[in-house]
Amino acid sequence: MRWSIMSFVAFFVFVGGSMSCDITFNSTDVIVNCNLSGIPPVPENVTILICVANMDFCNSDLFCNPKFDKLRVLDISLNHLHFIPKGCFSSFTVLEKLTLSDNGYLGFDNLYNACYGLNQTLIQELNVNRINHQVLVNRPFPRNISRLLTNTSLHTFNLEYNSIKFVEGGVLYYLPRTLQKMSVRGNRLSLFNTAEAIIEVNYLKNLKDLDISYQSSFRPRERKHVPLRDESVTYKQNPCADSYFIKFPTGLEILRARNVYYTHSCLPPVRTSNHSHLKYLDLSDSGFPEWIGPLGFNSLEELDLSENQCTFIKTDFFNQMPNLITLNIEKNYLGSFLASSSSISVFQELRSLMYLKMKDNFINHLPKALIRYNILLKELDISHNEIEALDLDIGPLKQLTYIDCSSNKLATLPKSFRDSLDRLVENTNMELKNITINLSRNRILCTCENLDFLKWCMISQVVVRFSPNDTCTGYDGNITLAYQYLRNECNKSNGAREWLYPVQTICILFILSVFALIVYKKRWSIIYRWYLFRLQRKGYTPIEGCNEGYQYDAFLSFADEDRPFVNQVVTKLEENTILQCQVCVHYRDFTPGRSIYKNIVEAIHMSKKTVVFISRAFLKSSWCKYELRMAMTEESYRKRQVVVMVVLEALPNTDLPLDVLQYYNKKSYIEKPTSQNDMEVYWKMLENMVANDDDLY
């Protein structure tokens, strides 16, 4: 029969069981280690007995032996113990440390048995983690256990992950006043069902370190996007409007409250007793998206607010923490807030701050004056963000030694920021100071334009740190190789650039000038064709079969001052039964609601001829001159005579525009006679010029 791997391991452990416990000696202790598979006997003069995960032999017959009167340390964790006799450890008069952790079936009844008689020992540390997570999870922690410990010299009590949801009154009150460190991490306590215990904790005058983390939740919160604060909304019931007073034990220096269930979604204003000596506070991963405050912790030196999904910090939130040295606000959503002007003064009152951690906050911009007043700042961590440009005012930060900008989107550092770093390298005694900036995993640009920055990275007294795998944007290789390559290539091309740039500029200006001149000379043709194109886009086509495809025989262009005479022309042309002319005049035939420009172009394009009545009033009208230019453009487009020029009054050449004067010299025109006798000849000439269709070429 073939053995499996697990069978082999079991066989190995069984064989190993034939070995005795490991016994070592030193000048003060006899140490017996029966971990996993050691077999007693154990010498009676043992001082340290460790029997972990040895379920076969680690039982009450072993660890309740009253002959172990010199035993100082006993660790019987992870043995699946179900029972401990009452007063089992009372005979160990010099016992200082007892560990019963990871025996999930013991429960609080057996903890009572274990604590019975400990007042006859020198017990200082009691570890009972994970002894109740298999039984009676809704049973409150009994105060009779605390009563058994009242007269002991206990200074460390660890009661972690025991599914404690309630505590009986007096549990903390009856604990020994010698207690300095206590942990109830990983239970199910809340502020509602432990209100009495919160008051009782103040009786523990010597308590220095308290851990209440991970209450009501055994899994860390998932980091997810939360909506940004809407300043325009007025909240009728604001839980952060009221101030809260919290009294801590006078000796408490460390409070760990990570991932604890709170009723508020914000950090409200908090006041503490003037006698508080709290130095370290951990409120991380507790779901505070808004920090209102202020938090009145005058003695606080380190504050951890990381992983709170925070999007907003009130300006005076940190104003009552004059002694704060370390501030951790990592893994929040402060990018939008820090990019706003309201964030400029948020750290202003933290004059003792030395370590500021803002990594992983979706930051893309930081105000220049954000840390200007934190003159004692030594280390700044803004890594794992989305910063593309960094220009913080770090000039006053004479103690600065380290900036972590890794894993951002930086392509370069501005010269002003580099100069500030160089000045900080030398202190007042002109002695070199070590300053490091971490730029690894960014998007450093390796081009000739950024060569000055790359050179600074290589020769500056500031320690510029890159990752060995960092590559350049614009060069296939690491940054050091890129600098060496660009230093040679950019220097070669500098001479060429000195004359190439001016030549390129002159050529571009010449081409633009020629193009502008052509456009200017052809401007009317371009305008006409543009409007014609738009008409065609809208479905316009000449009406076929109507006078060779034209809607009108003539479009009459004139000034309003000449309208009486033009009315006579309209009558003469349209009442001529032989010609049967149809003319277009703006006051009658233009389409209402359409722009004048489009009406003019359409009328000229739909007319066989354009009759222009030149007078002083005509030359003063911008619309008349526009109609003339469009008609001349149509004439060029059709390659036949379109414009019929009629001069209504004698005009000197000096009054004529250049394009009209040129047309005078090249084309024929007719003048209005001054006597009535000549009018018949005039009408005949006008009718003939309108009726004829002479080609230009």
Image: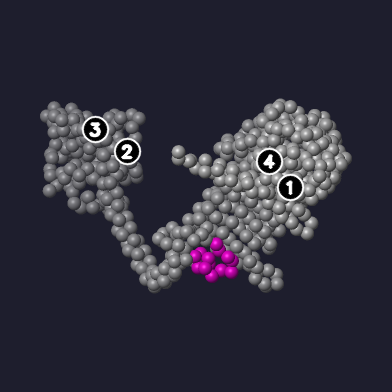
User: Badge 3, how many Cα within 10 Å: few under 14, some, many 20+?
Assistant: few
Q: Is residue 510 left or right of residue 277?
A: left
The mark closer to the camera, 3 or 1, is 1
> Which disc, if any, is residue 42?
1
At label 2, which amino acid type do we have?
A: Tyr
Pinpoint residue 89: horizontal percent, then vertical percent.
Answer: 80, 40
Q: Please name whichever residue, 206 or 228, is drawn nearer the observer in this view of the structure.
A: 206
At label 4, which amino acid type do we have?
A: Phe
**Mark 4 lies on residue:** 57
Instruction: Give the distance between the C-alpha atoms of the residues marked 4 and 3, in whole angstroms.
Output: 105 Å
**Mark 2 lies on residue:** 597
Pinpoint residue 500: horizontal percent, then vertical percent.
Answer: 36, 68
Instruction: Give the distance between the C-alpha atoms of the residues marked 1 and 4, in whole angstroms.
Output: 11 Å
Instruction: Give the distance between the C-alpha atoms of the residues marked 3 and 2, in whole angstroms.
Output: 16 Å
**Mark 3 lies on residue:** 540
User: Badge 1, how many Cα within 10 Å: few under 14, some, many 20+?
Assistant: some
At label 1, which amino acid type do we have?
A: Val
Q: Is residue 299 visible?
A: no
Q: Is residue 66 left or right of residue 381?
A: right
Instruction: Give the distance between the C-alpha atoms of the residues marked 3 and 1, in whole angstroms.
Output: 112 Å
